[in-house]
Every structure is written in structure tokens, then in C-alpha cells.
């Protein structure tokens, strides 16, 4: 039997809005439309845009765009390649943290030089987290550097059992480390690559069933702090090219998939509240906005229709999934912004979360 339940709304701390510079993939209007259609009420944008978010002027530009276009609340991460340490103090109050790419990723922001990594961990003001894209040896390195420099560390899109265990150990030592997992790693494995081809290619790559199981186990054990989409849209044309870019969209499917997991007995309602709202707010050091919530219809069954997606890329790796929940309404600070498949506001309701 179908039922409507109220939920605080997802605070998604890992999103690629693609504007400026990559607006063939997404822009702040289409990206935040996808957010509210997916029950996401706040997003934090990653620095791998063109130009990258390496200067206070780049933050000015993104703030201007977001103020004009954002339909949900938003924040920004600063980025670094080691050449902009002098900007850290200037931007610190305006961003949610510092994002570092220490492993292979989409774009050219990867840092390989250990000396640079060291200098960055020393220079970032203490308090707000350093977020890392890092696996295995690079993740170990990041944990060491964070410990040595008294930095809070947040590990993005953890996808492997070994990496989850590194983080569990560091937590056991009492280090201030948090981590996120992405829905594609929870709901897909490397077996889906045959079916989906490049539409199932992202960094970190899809894991084995044992990796996937470890992510669910560590949700239950409390190692996983939050679920973040790593919404990383690319056009179908780009994905069908001979060297397709890594990344998949996720804003519109995360909550329906996670509520489906509740229906399937894999997750509890209270765990989902912790993972998608309470914990990301704690890590970001923000309070959830007042009168901000979503209504979710459960006890239904349907297949995703890609034609209804608001993301500019227009596809999803979950087009074959059977979903057992959908977002009916999204309310931000008392104003209904999304209802029954339609964006119902013409005003830009988004505010900066810090
Ligand atoms: C992301 C992107 O496309 O910007 N791609 C991905 O595969 N996850 C970059 C990233 O999060 O590393
Ligand atoms: Zn990444
Ligand atoms: Zn990402
Ligand atoms: Zn509950």
C-alpha cells in the first residue's frame, strides 16, 4: 500500500555543478533542479570546474552564478594544486572545506608531488575539513598527513573494502576522520559494467560484490558517516566517445534508491536520516534549514523514466532499476519548490549554507 512520509531532505556534500566552464554537462539551474527533484535540499559544489576553484575570484564568480540560479541551498569547496596557498586565509570563511585530488580523477587537478601535499596540509587553516579523493597508498598518506597536521579529514566516495578498513582503523585510534559512500557503489558492482559500458565508469571504479558488501557492513558498524551522490554528469555523446570521461549523475536517484533499500530491509529510516542529513550537517558545521523537508511516496514500484530527468545530461546508470519510492514534494524554508515531477518555483530559493 502506498504511503507518504516526511523526511528532512538530503544534504549532499559531494556534487559537481559543472558551471563555470563545463555547462554542456550541467549548469546551476539544471543541476539544482535535479537536486530538488531528487529530494536534495542542499549541495556542496566541487572545485574541478573551468577555471578551477583555486582563487577568491573563482569563489566570487561561483557565488554570483549560484545567487542567480540555485533552487536549493549550496556551498563551495576550495581546491588546490599547491600553487595557491596564499589564498587559503582569504577564502576560508566562504567555503565548506578544501578538496584535494590525490588520485586519478576527471580533469587535471590531481596532485602527485608529496612535497606539495605536505605544504597544503600544513597551510590549510585548522577547523574546516580537508576532503580527499584518495585510494589505498594515497589514502594512507592523507591519513598520516592529517594526523601530523591536526587536520580534520573527510574521505570522499570510499568504494573498497581495504579503504574502508583503513578508515575504520584510523577512527579507532580516535583521529578526526569522516567518510562518505556514493549510491553507485552501494547499488552497482563491476558486474554491471558489461550491461552499462561507459555509463558505469567512474572514479573510484565499481567494486566487487565483496567491496559492495563491506560498504553496507560499515554503514551498520557506523564507520560510514554519510552518503553523498558524487553527482558527476557528462553528456551521452562524451560517454559514448572512445575515451569516455569518468563520472555518473546521481542527484535524482539517490533518495529513491535509498528509500527502496529501506523497503528491502537493508537500511532503517533513522540510519538514512543520519547518513543523508544529520551527519553531513555535522561534518560541514551547519544547521539544517528551518521548515525544509521532502515528502516521499513509498510502497510503490516503477522504473525510472530518463525523459523525466532534470539533469542536463539526461541519462542515469539506474535506468533499469526498480524503484520503490519517489519524491513527491520538496519544501525549502517553507516554500514548495518541487511537486509531482515539476519544478514549481520561478524564484531562486537557494541560500549559501555558511
Ligand atoms: C568526477 C567528475 O566527473 O568530476 N568523476 C568521477 O568519476 N567521480 C570527479 C571525481 O569525483 O573524482
Ligand atoms: Zn573523486
Ligand atoms: Zn566527485
Ligand atoms: Zn524514523
Image (cartoon, rainbow, N blue to C red):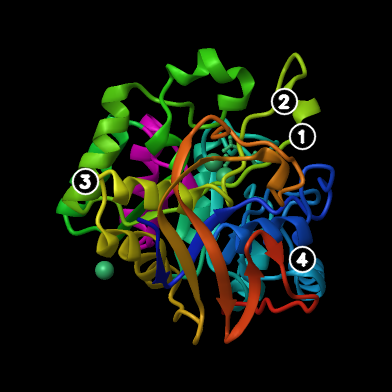
Asked whether the residues under the numbered discs 2 and 1 touch, taking CB atoms below 8 Å apart as contact, a structural biologist would say: yes
- Mark 1 lies on residue: 235
Q: How far separated are the C-alphas under marks 1 and 4?
A: 22 Å
Q: Nearer the viewer, mark 1 or mark 4?
A: 1
| Residue 184 visible in rendering | yes
Q: Secondary structure at mark 2?
A: helix
Cα separation between marks 4 and 3: 35 Å
> Mark 1 vs mark 3: which is more N-terminal?
3
Report x, y in % for residue 100. 55, 48
Q: Residue at x 49, y 49 (%)?
A: 254
Discs 2/4, front: 2
- Of 162 and 344, nearer the camera is 344
Mark 3 vs ligand 2: CB below 8 Å: no
Count neighbours of disc 2 (C-alpha within 10 A) and say few if under 14, some if 14 to 19, many if 20 or more: many
Please give the range of residues in magenta. Answer: 132-159
**Which residue lies under the disc numbered 2?**
239
Q: Which mark is residue 168?
A: 3
Q: Is residue 170 above or below residue 272?
A: above
Asked whether residue 118 is in view, the answer is no
Please determine whether, in this image, residue 237 is positioned above or below residue 185.
above
Disc 2, disc 4: CB below 8 Å?
A: no
The disc label shown at residue 62, or none: 4
Amino acid at each position: 500500500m502506498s504511503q507518504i512520509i516526511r523526511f528532512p531532505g538530503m544534504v549532499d556534500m559531494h556534487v559537481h555543478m559543472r558551471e563555470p566552464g563545463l555547462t554542456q554537462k550541467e549548469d546551476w539551474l539544471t543541476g539544482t533542479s535535479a537536486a530538488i527533484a531528487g529530494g536534495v535540499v542542499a549541495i556542496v559544489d566541487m572545485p574541478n570546474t573551468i577555471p578551477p576553484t583555486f582563487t577568491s575570484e573563482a569563489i566570487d564568480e561561483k557565488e554570483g552564478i549560484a545567487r542567480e540560479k540555485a533552487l536549493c541551498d549550496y556551498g563551495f569547496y576550495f581546491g588546490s594544486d599547491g600553487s595557491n596557498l596564499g589564498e587559503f586565509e582569504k577564502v576560508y570563511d566562504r567555503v565548506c572545506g578544501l578538496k584535494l585530488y590525490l588520485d586519478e580523477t576527471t580533469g587535471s587537478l590531481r596532485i602527485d608531488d608529496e612535497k606539495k601535499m605536505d605544504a597544503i596540509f600544513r597551510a590549510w587553516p585548522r577547523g574546516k575539513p580537508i576532503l580527499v579523493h584518495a585510494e589505498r597508498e594515497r589514502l594512507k598518506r592523507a591519513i598520516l598527513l592529517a594526523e601530523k597536521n591536526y587536520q580534520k579529514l573527510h574521505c570522499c566516495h570510499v568504494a573498497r573494502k581495504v579503504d574502508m578498513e583503513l578508515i575504520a582503523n584510523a577512527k579507532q585510534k580516535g583521529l578526526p576522520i569522516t567518510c562518505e559512500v556514493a549510491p553507485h557503489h552501494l547499488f552497482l558492482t563491476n558486474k554491471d559494467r558489461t550491461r552499462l559500458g561507459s555509463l558505469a565508469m567512474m572514479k573510484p571504479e565499481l567494486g566487487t560484490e565483496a567491496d559492495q558488501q563491506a560498504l553496507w557492513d560499515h554503514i551498520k558498524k557506523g564507520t560510514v558517516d554519510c552518503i553523498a551522490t558524487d553527482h558527476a554528469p557528462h553528456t551521452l555523446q562524451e560517454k559514448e566517445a572512445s575515451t569516455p570521461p569518468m563520472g555518473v549523475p546521481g542527484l535524482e536517484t539517490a533518495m529513491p534508491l535509498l528509500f527502496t533499500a529501506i523497503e528491502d530491509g537493508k537500511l532503517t529510516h533513522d540510519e538514512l536520516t543520519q547518513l543523508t542529513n544529520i551527519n553531513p550537517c555535522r561534518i560541514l558545521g551547519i544547521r539544517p534549514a528551518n521548515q525544509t523537508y521532502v515528502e516521499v511516496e513509498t510502497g510503490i514500484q516503477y522504473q525510472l523514466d530518463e525523459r523525466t530527468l532534470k539533469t542536463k545530461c539526461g541519462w542515469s546508470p539506474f535506468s533499469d532499476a526498480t524503484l520503490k519510492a519517489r519524491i513527491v514534494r520538496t519544501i525549502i524554508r517553507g516554500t514548495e519548490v518541487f511537486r509531482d515531477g515539476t519544478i514549481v518555483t520561478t524564484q531562486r530559493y537557494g541560500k549559501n549554507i555558511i
